[in-house]
Image (cartoon, rainbow, N blue to C red):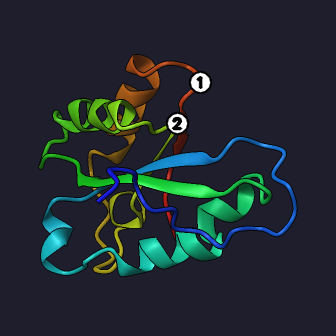
Amino acid sequence: MSGTAPTIAATTTEATSQPPIKLGIIRCQQTEDYCPGTKCFQTVQSKQGAFAELNSSSDIELVGFTNCGGCPGKRVLARAELLLKKGANTIAFGSCVQKGLPLDFPCPFAARMKKLLQNKLPTDIRILDYTH
């Protein structure tokens, strides 16, 4: 193994004018029993959902996929910092957190976790509310 993370995106044939988006996804710990993350990965690869709004000429490199650390979300900052150490410049909450997918049960701590990351992470780190 080379030690580099795979790029989960269709590479464009045009020269990319923007640096790659290095993505870390934080999902709901309790949703792991129901969802392996397939839809999140497919959405990144096809640049749909939240990723459709990003610069389409940039490749998206997935640098990590982790959970929030469990309720009430106090460990989310440590998880986000770990993703930053792995090179992330964008953190996305999985749709299980903000939208409650696949069980239609949004996290009651989602807004608090996002605010914590906005207040504690460097200001140049992009935070996305959802994946798909």
Q: Residues within 10 Å of mark 2 (few under 14, many from 20)?
A: some
Q: Quadrant of the rendered structure where residue 28 is?
A: bottom left
Q: Position of residue 81 (x, y in %)?
A: 31, 29
Q: Quadrant of the N terminus?
A: bottom left
Q: In the displayed structure, does residue 63 sit left or right of residue 127?
A: left
Name the residue nearer the viewer: 60 or 90: 60
Q: Residue at x 32, y 36 (%)?
A: 80
Other residues around mark 1 within 10 Å, as few (<14) / some (14–19) / many (≥20): few
In the image, is residue 67 above or below residue 118?
below
* Pointer 2 or 1: first along the chain: 2
Quarter of the rendering containing residue 78:
top left
- Where residue 51 appears, as percent x and y from the top left, is 63, 61
Q: Which residue is mark 2?
A: 89
Q: Which amino acid, mark 1?
A: Asp
Q: Percent position (x, y) of residue 117?
A: 39, 29
Q: Between residues 67 and 9, which one lies in front from this camera angle?
A: 9
**Residue 132 circle label:** none
Image coordinates of residue 110 in percent, x first then y, are 34, 47
Helix, strand or loop status at disc 2:
loop
**Which residue position is annotated with label 1?**
124
